[in-house]
Amino acid sequence: MNVKLAAQVLSHSVASALSLYVAAQRIECTAIDTARFVKKMDTLFDTMNSRTLKHPKKDMCAVTKNSCHVEIWKEMIEWIKTWKIISHTGKKFTAPSKKGWILTECIHRSF
């Protein structure tokens, strides 16, 4: 999947829309888990793609000694470690992206 497209799908607005549809009982209440996943992924993308010193979204500000990034990355690594990927047939497996995210965050933390 194209990263730009993934970032658009795994966005704050998609998470908000899912939450709204759950609250309005337009979709199953279990979709709230998907909304939470999408919101966390949005935060993860934002912290990894920060470009400017100042931005309205604090996650998109540049990484500094006092920024929130390292704490977010610590939380995200623990969250990513809990991912369990199960196919539609019930087979469990580990996606390479899981290890890649953890490695990327560890590298970013070392700066």
Image (cartoon, helix red, strand yellow):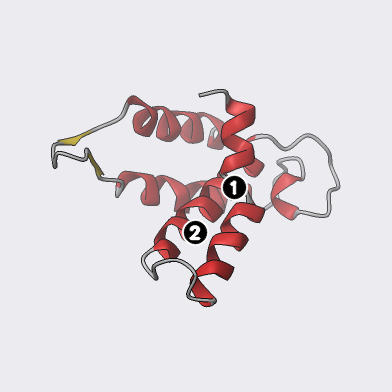
Q: Residue at x 64, y 43 (%)?
A: 47
Measured as percent of width and height from the top left, residue 1 is found at 50, 24
Q: Residue at x 69, y 50 (%)?
A: 59
Q: What element does badge 1 sit on?
A: helix
Q: Residue 108, image x and y in percent?
A: 56, 32
Q: Is residue 88 above or below residue 14?
A: above
The mark lying in front, picked from 2 and 1, is 2
Q: Nearer the viewer, residue 27 or 102?
A: 27
Q: Is residue 19 visible?
A: yes
Q: Residues within 10 Å of mark 2 (few under 14, many from 20)?
A: many
Q: To which residue does mark 2 refer?
A: 35
- Could one spot residue 111 in this view of the protein? no
In the figure, 86 relative to 110: above or below?
A: below
Q: Is residue 4 left or right of residue 55?
A: left
Quadrant for residue 13, please give it: bottom right
Disc 1 crowd, CA 10 A, few/some/many (<14, 14-19, 20+):
many
Q: Quadrant of the C terminus?
A: top right
Q: Which residue is mark 1?
A: 42
Image coordinates of residue 17 in percent, x first then y, are 60, 61
Task: Answer left or right for 3 relative to 106.
Answer: right
Q: Residue 21 versus residue 75: which sits nearer the camera? A: 21
Q: CA distance from mark 2 to mark 1?
A: 11 Å
Q: Is residue 106 above or below residue 2?
A: below
Amino acid bearing label 1: Asp
* Secondary structure beneath label 2: helix
Which amino acid does the dot numbered 2 rest on? Ala
Residue farthest to the front, as pictured: 26
Front-most of residues 45 and 108: 45
First reached walking from the N terminus: tag 2 or tag 1: 2
Residue positioned 72% across, 38% down in the render: 50
Mark linked to residue 82: none
Q: Nearer the viewer, residue 2 or 78?
A: 2
